Amino acid sequence: MKNLLRVTLLAILAWTMPSAALLAQNKAPDYAPLDRPITVDQVPGKDIFYSIGSPGIPGKANEGNTSNAGYVVTPDGVVVFDALGTPSLGWALLQDIRKRTDKDIRYMVVSHYHADHIYGLQAFRDHSRAVIIAQDNSADYTENRETADERADERLDQRRDALAPWVDEHTRIVPPDIIFDDRLTISLGGKHFSLIFAGPAHSKSDIMMMVEPDGVLFAGDIVQNGRIPFMNSDDVSTVHWLKALDDVRTPNPKYIIPGHGKPFSAPQEAIAFTRDYILYVRKAMGEAVANWTDFDTAYNATDWSKYKSYPAFESNNRGNAYRIFLELEASQFKK
């Protein structure tokens, strides 16, 4: 209740006070233009829209567009989920919203603070009055703490090189206006948006957003379709991740939009790829830990043919296996 009250009060302040963002809404941005425009699809029969990124890792070939984002149009305004991986992409998403509705963008919900989901926040901060909401642990990232999933300054420097000109010296980290701990519900235009903390799993600040009465779940990176997920972080917990995947079924969604990959219309189908991958790596690395086999030997002896053809295998799989090896090794010594 306290979180909901805080959202309401801050939203009132945001919508009654003049702001620089309001003055900047109609100004042409300085963001580098995209050569590959985003594609936005609609959930059948719903005023809910989503953009699907390329399946690989961020680079110049895909212009950093590798994650998913979406938005919900209500009679009283728009709720957006995630902002994509560059200010240019965030601006493209904002422009797509403007093509479909003149309703104000009221809330921006951030699934988690990783670079491929947040650099687009800059466009929404500069060109709308959206109230940005994230989970409490996102402060580790926005304040560049050593305890963050990744160091924000180091990642930004890396992306300025890898994603120039779409990420440049003017790109900045935009912090949330509102943070919450476990759950938060927003009511707007006859719809209820349940924000559910699902971490620490893929990150320390994972959020899923259930939209009712539509039955649509924005799952963030808890669910990934047809792409090897990134797990090589100290804060990844595959135990919690597996539990979060089980929790995907709890609100009984009719349609699931993952953090990466195409959407699903069945919860079991949605969780299968990510869950099966985590279990497969845990089994292989678990046997290695139990038998006191060193990581390199275990990794090279594992049959990866089932996953080798998937996007991001080369960049993510070995690091994922090593992280899970360490996780299982640590749990064994705790016994």
Image: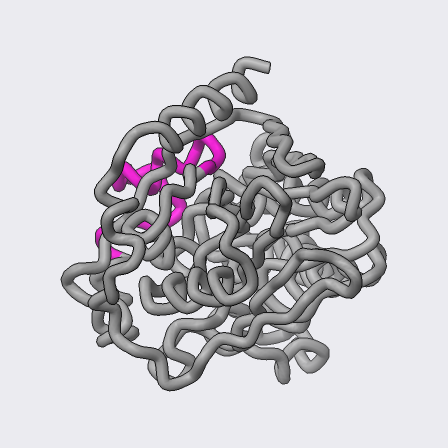
Pick the residue in front: 73 or 220: 73
Q: Residue at x 39, y 54 (%)?
A: 118
Q: Which residues are magenta?
A: 133-154
* Magenta segment includes 134: yes
Q: Quadrant of residue 225?
A: bottom right
Q: Is residue 203 above or below residue 266?
A: above
Residue 95 picture quarter: bottom left
Q: Is residue 117 placed above or below 180 in the rendered structure? A: below
Residue at 24% x, 48% y is 23
User: Relative to 127, is 193 on the left or the right?
Assistant: right
Quadrant of the frame with the C terminus? top right
Q: Residue at x 57, y 78 (%)?
A: 311
Residue at position x 36%, y 28% in the image: 16
Q: Nearer the viewer, residue 6 or 299?
A: 6
In the picture, which quadrant includes the N terminus? Answer: top right
In percent of width and height, residue 275 lies at 73, 57
Is residue 326 visible to us here? no
Res 115 visible: yes
